[in-house]
Amino acid sequence: VTLFPLQDALLNTTGGFRVLGTIAVTGTTTVTPAAVVFTDKDGTAADSYTVPATTGVDYLVGGTVKPAGTYPGTGTVTVTARAKTDYIIAAGAMASWSATFKTTPNPVTPAAVVFTDKDGTAADSYTVPATTGVDYLVGGTVKPAGTYPGTGTVTVTARAKTDYIIAAGAMASWSAT
């Protein structure tokens, strides 16, 4: 801090600059962390999260700094941005991201529909099983688990519910006359 030469009304001056003191000033740079990208695909093998590279920012997972890169995603992952020395996170900037990776869709094998065809028609029936993750449809309408009278040709089709898929190679349609 320097005081400039002063002059009064009679034109008297102090004769030069006077140093009053010296202070150190360090620069602080404001940074905005780049967003973490979460990828949650069907199943779990391709689930991942990508930590970006942002100058002046450390990204932490569970309190540990994660270098920029792509990592496998499982369960719930929370990534927090922290300013490095001589940097500050910009006011209002997002500094935490979180995602819960789902393990769905879950493959499911529908249980078989059972048809009973006895002599005559009075005792003919079909039984729709209860299978977690599966809706059974007759004529496009969902049929709850149970036994129903059978007449004519009956076709029952299995359809996966939300977060499920019919397992590869599994039978998903049954028909009887």
Image (cartoon, rainbow, N blue to C red):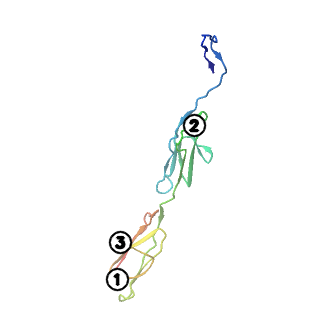
- Between 158 and 15, the one lying in front of the other is 15
73 lies left or right of 152: right
Eye-nearest disc, 3 or 2? 2
**Picture quadrant of residue 17:** top right
Query: Could you tell me which residue is drawn at 44 percent across and 74 percent down?
Result: 112
Q: Secondary structure at mark 3?
A: loop
Q: CA distance from mark 1 to mark 3?
A: 17 Å
Percent coordinates x, y for residue 174 in the rendering: 38, 74
Residue 151, labelled with which disc? 1
Q: Which mark is residue 88?
A: 2
Q: Find numbered disc 2 in the image and state the secondary structure of the residue it sits on.
A: strand
Mark 3 burial class by Cα count in 10 Å: few <14, some 14-19, many 20+: few
Tell me which label, 2 or 1, sits earlier in the chain.
2
Q: Earlier in the sequence, mark 1 or mark 3?
A: 3
Which of the labelled discs sits on residue 140, or is there none?
3
Amino acid bearing label 1: Thr
Contact (Cβ within 8 Å) of mark 3 with mark 2: no
Whole-angstrom CA distance, mark 2 to mark 1, is: 75 Å
Query: Which of the two discs, 1 and 3, sits closer to the camera?
Result: 3
**135 to 91, vertically: above or below:** below
**In front: mark 2 or mark 1?**
2
**Which quadrant of the figure contains the C terminus?**
bottom left
Query: Quick one: label 3 or label 2, which is nearer the N terminus?
Result: 2
Residue found at the very far right of the displayed protein = 21
Residue 103: x percent and y percent? 51, 58
> The N terminus appears in which quarter of the rendering?
top right
Q: What amino acid is found at the position of numbered circle 3 in the picture?
A: Gly
